[in-house]
Image: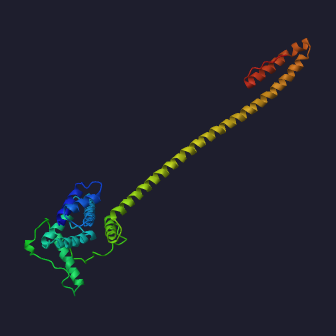
């Protein structure tokens, strides 16, 4: 079995974005290729993905080489440190110096930083368990033989072992929250992290699609309301015009009725009287034509 070979190949594939669409198929092939137990690389895949996200986030906020700055250790890095060393020792990798160097390469940290963190945590853990001096056996080497992987020595103060401390709900660091979520999900039986995240992703897509549909519906409603208002305004103007036409027609009917009476009276007059009233009759007819814009045929 070769966890080291599989892990470094996995990291290279992730960096070069060569995983493909099926993560499970990739991990199964990698486990088969390196004679590893089925499902043993799943947790390491999540670790590496998380570390790359953290690295990308730090790179976007700083132009300084990430190996030369005093980066804060996060809980998943500490979890990975001890789990990897434990698994490699079970494979037969007993040289702690080589194991710490492998961890440093995966975490993109200097060897001295990883070495200091590891022994600080082991020392702190031993202090909390004074009655058990054989909890962990490690092989140490002198400081003069340590391989230097970083340019500057990273001075870090010892801190209490907090591998199993839950992340505070008040922590605003998104990567810390995600790392805590991944760690907790991995400890729950019957829950697969990839399926959970895929389901959440699908739910967010559906929510966005529903939001777009609601916006489109509101837009259609707005257009319909605007068209309705335009039609109502046109109808109102038509009604007003119809009322004016009706009024004008009623007035015309009254004038025509009056003219008909005058024609009847004019026809009853004698010839001399007709000649005398012809002028006033003609004026009356011209008044009706000018007032309503029409030409009337008036017969006897």
Image height check: is 34 above or below 222?
A: below
- Would residue 121 be found to the left or right of residue 214 on screen? left
Q: How many marks?
A: 0
Image height check: is 73 above or below 125?
A: above
Image height check: is 221 above or below 54?
A: above
Image height check: is 256 above or below 141?
A: above
Residue most extreme to the left = 144
Q: Position of residue 267 (x, y in %)?
A: 89, 16
Q: Position of residue 120 (x, y in %)?
A: 19, 77
Q: Nearer the viewer, residue 178 or 68?
A: 178
Q: Evaluate whether residue 153 shows in this view.
A: no
Measuring 27% from the left and 58% from the top, which residue is drawn there? 25
**Picture quadrant where residue 248 is located:** top right
**Picture quadrant where residue 276 is located:** top right
Q: Position of residue 94 (x, y in %)?
A: 13, 73
**Picture quadrant where residue 104 is located:** bottom left
Q: Nearer the viewer, residue 21 or 294?
A: 21
Q: Position of residue 281 (x, y in %)?
A: 83, 18
Quadrant location of the N terminus in the rendered image: bottom left
- Would residue 279 be found to the left or right of residue 198 on screen? right
Measuring 24% from the left and 83% from the top, which residue is drawn there? 128
Q: Nearer the viewer, residue 85 or 36?
A: 36
- Would residue 238 be found to the left or right of residue 174 on screen? right
Q: Evaluate whether residue 202 shows in this view.
A: yes
Residue most extreme to the top = 271
Q: How is the image coloured?
A: rainbow
Quadrant location of the C terminus in the rendered image: top right
């Amino acid at each position: 079995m070769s966890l080291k070979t599989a892990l470094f190949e996995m990291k290279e594939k992730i960096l070069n974005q060569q995983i493909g669409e099926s993560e499970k198929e990739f991990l199964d092939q990698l486990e088969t290729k390196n004679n590893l137990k089925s499902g043993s690389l799943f947790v390491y895949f999540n670790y590496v993905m998380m570390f790359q996200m953290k690295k990308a986030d730090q790179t976007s906020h700083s132009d300084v080489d990430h190996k030369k700055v005093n980066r804060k250790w996060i809980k998943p890095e500490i979890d990975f440190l001890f789990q990897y060393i434990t698994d490699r020792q079970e494979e037969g990798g007993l040289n702690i110096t080589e194991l710490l160097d492998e961890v440093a390469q995966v975490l993109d940290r200097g060897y001295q930083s990883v070495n200091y963190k590891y022994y600080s945590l082991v020392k702190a853990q031993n202090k909390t368990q004074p009655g058990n001096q054989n909890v962990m056996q490690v092989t140490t080497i002198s400081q003069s033989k340590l391989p230097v992987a970083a340019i500057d020595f990273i001075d870090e103060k010892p801190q209490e072992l907090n591998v199993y401390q839950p992340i505070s709900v008040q922590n605003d660091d998104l990567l810390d929250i995600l790392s805590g979520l991944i760690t907790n999900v991995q400890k729950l039986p019957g829950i697969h992290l990839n399926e959970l995240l895929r389901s959440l992703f699908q739910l967010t897509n559906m929510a966005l699609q529903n939001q777009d549909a609601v916006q489109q519906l509101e837009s259609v409603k707005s257009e319909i309301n605007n068209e309705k208002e335009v039609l109502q305004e046109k109808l109102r103007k038509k009604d007003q015009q119809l009322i004016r036409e009706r009024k004008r027609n009623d007035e015309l009917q009254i004038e025509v009725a009056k003219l008909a009476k005058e024609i009847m009276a004019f026809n009853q007059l004698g010839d001399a009287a007709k000649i005398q009233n012809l002028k006033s009759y003609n004026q009356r007819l011209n008044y009706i034509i000018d007032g309503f814009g029409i030409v009337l045929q008036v017969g006897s």
